[in-house]
Image: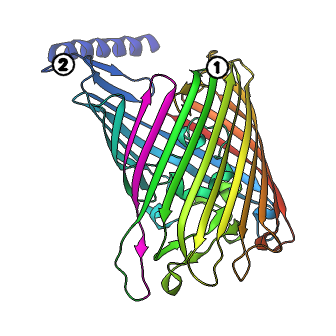
Amino acid sequence: MIRKHFAGFAASALALAISAQAFAGAVTTDGADIVIKTKGGLEVATTDKEFSFKIGGRVQADYSRFDGFYTVNGDTADAGYFRRAFLEVGGVMFTDWAYQVNYDLSHNSGGDERSSDGYFDEASLTYNGFKPLAIKVGRFDPEFGLEKATSSKWVTAPERTAAYDLVDWTNGHNGGLGIQLSGSVGSSLYGSAGITVKDGTTVDTQTEDGDSVKQYNLRGVFAPMHEAGNVLHFGLNYAYRDLSDSAIDARIRSRLGMRGVSTDGGQDAGTNGNRLLLGGRSVTGANSGAYGDDAAFGLEAAWAAGPFSVQGEYVSRSMDSERAGYDDVDADGYYVQLAYTLTGEARGYKLGKFDSLKPSNKQIGAWEVFYRYDSLNVEDDTAGGIAVTDDVEAKVHNLGVNWYANESVKISGAYIKAKVDNAQNSVAAGDDSGDGFVVRAQYAF
């Protein structure tokens, strides 16, 4: 019986093959030949590199469990959520024009009103006809910092450094549009300069005219050693915006590496999630215009030798007050990160950023261990008090392991421990420290 069914199946398959041969049409083009690639998404390109089209994306599913300072009552809570679920479309047209459109389906853009329906992470058009210069316009993240320049697919810890929370506006578009000029000199120098028009409302004491906040970014990188496993990297960053007369949420807050305390991509700790308030105020209505100049500065450095890498960044921020009852806000923070690949692979590097880590052994993949220390400090003496006695401080330890099963699948796990000093919202449950863990399953294509 089995042989009879097999013979029938074989006959049917042969008939289908003959039919397909008879009716299939030839694929032709009116120009250069076409190359189709399916490794890492779907890419179609002409051999003369004049046109290309690629569909890709990434999905990051997280689960975390935490207690202590991370919850209002100090008891254990957990969270399961999609950190990111990107659909990415990009390519080249007419040789000199590049386009990129990324849409995040995870509903996890940072806890604001846009997240309920997903959001455009990027929608940009770049002109490369003035090489080595590139001109980019559209919606994209302004450049500020080494960790932000590195794709979320290939940052070492599940979350980027908590020190970035001090200057969170510097490298996020927040729904705005911008223009950026970037370029390189040889193989060791890179720079960029950009202006971003962000969503915002400008309000004076009487009328509202709807003007937007303008942001200016500068970044420069010097990398005398710039190959995978042989990296020496230095960078400078500067960003500025004028908040005069603006209604804006100028609070400096941090999840301290534990996204699950407050996230929109799924289940989180809800009202029991405790998010650290370090300084600043949300100023709207009659309080609009409480702050003026808002400037941030950053230093970055990295060194890699074979499977070992060390990197760090320092950021500082000064936000000037313009109204009685509000004080200047000064913040600074840094991180230091060590990483080592147990299986011997080196982290990839492209001028200005780290790139993917590709397993050399297809059976066991690549295994990486890491440790990162984050430090945050904010001084805000505004009446009403955010700090209990002195500056609000936070320290975060991140210890973890990454398994790169292949070039598309990455499994991460990290233990996180935080300690907070002088914060008012650290005393709700009498806890000024907390710990927990995060695990992530990532598929990138």
Badge 2, how many Cα within 10 Å: few under 14, some, many 20+? few
Q: Residue at x 50, y 72 (%)?
A: 248
Whether the magenta-drawn stretch holds residue 184 is answered as: yes
Is residue 130 rendered to the left or right of residue 302?
left
Give the left or right position of residue 128, taking residue 274 as reference.
left
Could you tell me how far apart the alpha carbons at marks 2 and 1 are, in whole angstroms? 43 Å
Q: Report the side of 393 relative to 259 (left or right).
A: right
Image quadrant of residue 34? top left
Residue 217 in the image, given as x and y percentages of width and height: 47, 50
Answer above or below: position of 210 versus 2: below
Q: Secondary structure at mark 1?
A: loop
Q: Position of residue 167 (x, y in %)?
A: 60, 57
Region of the chain picked out in magenta, as a range: 179-205
Q: Secondary structure at mark 2?
A: loop
Nearer to me, 276 or 116:
276
Indicate the amino acid at tag 2.
Val
Residue pointed to by mark 2? 27
Q: Quadrant of the N terminus?
A: top left
Q: Which residue is mark 1?
A: 229
Number of numbered discs visible in the structure rendering: 2
The residue that appears at 41% across and 59% down in the rendered structure is 175
